Image (tube, rainbow, N blue to C red):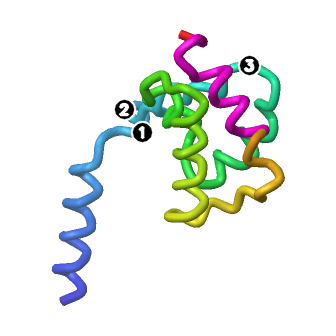
Amino acid sequence: MKASIAILLIALALSLPAADAWKLPADVPKFRAGPGVEIAAVNCILCHSSDYLSTQPPMERAAWLATVNKMREKYGAPLPTNQVDRVVDYLAGAYGKKAR
């Protein structure tokens, strides 16, 4: 039994790629600069990476507000109510239709 386990472990080790074949993932995009970036980064990064924003279509402020409210109400994002407007203003400015 011990010999079977040892053989299995050796076969597994031989099937793994060499250590120099490992590559780190590409850098994750950063939040775009703009007023309120700090508060958005601190709150948004708790649930998802910054690249999530860069994959969203450009949206008007009302759509960003609906998105932020959905994140808070449906997914439980811990964004305090008194910070919603600042985050939405940042998202509309940095990732809105006029930003692109």
Say if the magenta span includes residue 52: no
Q: Which is nearer the eye, 99 or 7?
A: 99
For badge 1, the amino acid type reads Ala
Q: Which residue does the numbered mark 2 point to in the structure image?
A: 21
Q: Which residue does the numbered mark 1 point to in the structure image?
A: 19
Q: Which is nearer the eye, 63 or 2?
A: 63
Give above or below for 77 relative to 61: below
Mark 3 or mark 1, which is nearer the start of the sequence? 1
Quadrant housing residue 36? top right
Residue density around tag 1, few if under 14, some if 14–19, many if 20 or more, within 10 Å: few
Rendered location of residue 62, percent (x, y) = 57, 35
- Secondary structure at badge 2 equals helix
* Circles 2 and 1 in contact, beta carbons < 8 Å: yes
Q: Residue at 19% across / 60% down in the picture?
A: 11
Q: Where does the magenta region start and end?
A: 86-99
| Mark nearer the viewer, 1 or 3 | 3
Quadrant housing residue 42? top right
